[in-house]
Image (spheres, coloured by chain):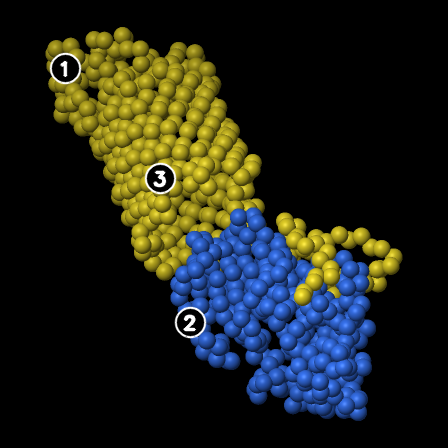
Amino acid sequence: MITFISVKKPVVVGKDLEVVAVAVTKKTHNNRELAQLLAAASCALIGGISPIVNAADSWDVDSAFLLYSESDGRVSAAEPVISATKNYDEETKLTFKIAADTLTGASPNGATASDHVQIFTSPSGKSSYNATTGEQPLDDTFKDTRIALSSNWTAPIDRDWAYGVGGYLSKEHDYQSLGVNGSLTRYLNQKNTTLTLGLNLSNDTVNPEGGIPTGLIQVPLNNLGSEFTQRSDAENKNLIDAVFGVTQIINRKTIMQFNYALSTSSGYLTDPYKIISVIDDNAGTNYGGNFQSSGRDLYLYEKRPDSRLKQSIYWQTKYQFDNDDILDVSYRYMFDDWGVNSHTIDAKYRFRFDNQYLEPQLRWYTQSKADFYHRYLNSSDYTNADFASADYRLGDLDTYTLGLKYGYKFADETELYTRFSLYHQESSGDKGYGKLTSQELYPGLDAAMLILGYKF
Amino acid sequence: MKLIEKLLIDSSFNPSSHPNPSLWQESEHAYKIQFECMASNCSILIESKQLDLVKTAAKSAIIEAWRIEYKFSRYQTDNTFTKIHSNVDAIQKLDTETAQLMIFANHAYNASQGLFDITSGILRKVWKFDGSDNLPENSAVNELLTIVGWEKLGWNPNNPTELTLPSGMELDFGGIGKEYAVDKMLSICRQIFSKTTAAILINCGGDLACSGKRLNGESWKVGIESINDPTKATLIVALSSGALATSGDSRRFLMKDGIRYSHVLNPTTGWAMTDAPRSVTVGAPTCVNAGIVSTLALLKGPEAESFLASLDMDYWISN
């Protein structure tokens, strides 16, 4: 017959054993000292084990360096990114991220190529640049440095609910963005289903070189033009994004996610640096050539509507094979009230080896043009246009990305990874008329991107 | 429970030629590694999403346990223990780890007013706890007592790496070795999992230590063996951090004239305790700490319970 003559605390549930009360009574004073001495001696022997050290209580840092280079000496970028995450436990974490990028090179200003040399006013109006015969007009005054900081905190509320809050700040010399976001997560059926509602608010300020140009007005010869005197320094835009997502664990090998996102933006949505050519559609020798006004080629500043409503649906599935390889496939459909709709298909396959992986990626994106996208405007009716943009990013567009990522995990769980990708872009649309038909209106673009990263 | 594989450990790390440990999967992210060490069935429980780290941690921890076992074993001929005992009556140099154990033994000796004494192991030469009624002769006990006593050692805490061991005396690291190995194993596992989330519990024949709560936030449920039926747990202790150690052995005693002589020997008298509890389990931040307190409680004999109560530590006694 066994009896426990003393079971001081029959079952100590949820109570840390080392956090025993420290009350010292006179009667037991000596023994308390003895206990403390033995505890100290034990710790010294083991090498100072701190019982509160939690394995998860450390920073995970991901540092990466990104190089981006477009063909034909167009834009190139270098961007170091550091992100640090402190995991307090499985579900509580704080993340900080800092990125700095430097962009240099030339980007298309929106004007069409021409059969004669074109002279363009720089955005500040202080200088000008040229495009030779048949050359795609590129604004090479473009150079920018951006710094972005963001921070995010996520934590559980209780067993079934979790939340996240975050902030974002990015700054470049002519653009600032300030954002806040929040999310609420609900877990269902033993966390096999996760519902997430996310909200993101952002306020951006555009303060371009030379001020805010007037939309659909002729680009002045220089900053002495009267248009420059009417300019305001800066404009704002506001963005609200809401995402509703469902993540479902289908089985031990498959996880699926559906998202619906709604995004509205309002305010100054125009690109202040983009212009559009006006083409002469009067019959005659200049048919299809640049239309002249005030004795020079007519270019108008572009103008976009002051609001945009975007909606998108997204589906992603990840499947883990028996050999631990992972297939990750996603599809997104986006449409908006500018008339743009797009499809994106992205597939990645991760070959897993002992402590290495290789991940090829294939991505295809196709987009239909915005209602007010015009490669150029016609001299006969350009004054009737309410909105117009020749920005290729609003035109009919297909892009292809081919990527390969390689990662190596060291024994100490740090990871080195590198990703190389090739990007190809093709635009299409109306071929013009007369002299314009001999110009390349929709040049493609090739770019290469290299990322080198280290997680520790 | 599904057997995943045998963990292959190079024979150079397995000086006592134990069988290879086996790695089992208990559920999706819960693994158990079973191995032998110090004549006990030992196990490491790890909850982690990273099986590769689980293997690394288990191997490193087991290599460490086997190293400690071999280093201080009485039954080897070419280890630290033998080296110390073959070098008597002269100043010898101790390695850092051994010196640390000596410092700890010194603290334990002083704190227990001589009840915990690692030089007393030699008394087992006359005490054979075989369940019989053969008590040793008084004279034999007294003769051995002349070579028992921490203070007879030529050792000074101010210079802990130097020792002069009088001829005939013996150091017995067995009383703390297993608990020490448990703590060291946990420390190694923690280090390996320092960058990721994991829950770890090390168990060497009932002496155990854990890294904290389990991944699901619950404590580890530890069954304390019944002293009559070792296959049955009669008490479940919820361990959410720290360590447990149990002292006592119901199968090692002598019985004469209705008096039960426990296997715990009082180093000052050389005699077995007659009214000590049969088993004492103590909870403490480290396994070494739990072990020393539970051993000390047994050495307090009938005072064991009031002694434990005065420490304000968690404990469980069975008689």
Q: Which residue is mark 2?
A: B8
Residue identified by numbered label 3 = A256
Question: In this picture, is A233 found above or below B6?
Answer: above
Cα distance, mark 2 to mark 3?
Answer: 38 Å
Q: Earlier in the sequence, mark 1 or mark 3?
A: 3
The crowd level at tag 1 (other Cα within 10 Å; few <14, some 14-19, many 20+) is some
In the image, is A316 to the left or to the right of A135? right
- Residue extending farthest to the right is A26
Structural distance between the alpha carbons of marks 1 and 3: 56 Å
Which residue is found at the position 57% from the left and 46% from the top? A88
Colour of chain B as rendered:
blue
Q: Are marks 1 and 3 on the same chain?
A: yes
Q: Residue at x 87, y 57 (%)?
A: A26
Q: Chain of mark 3?
A: A
Which chain contains the residue that carries disc 1? A
Q: Which mark is residue A287?
A: 1
Q: Residue at x 25, y 31 (%)?
A: A366
Parent chain of label 2: B
Task: Place residue B302 in its image quadrant.
Answer: bottom right
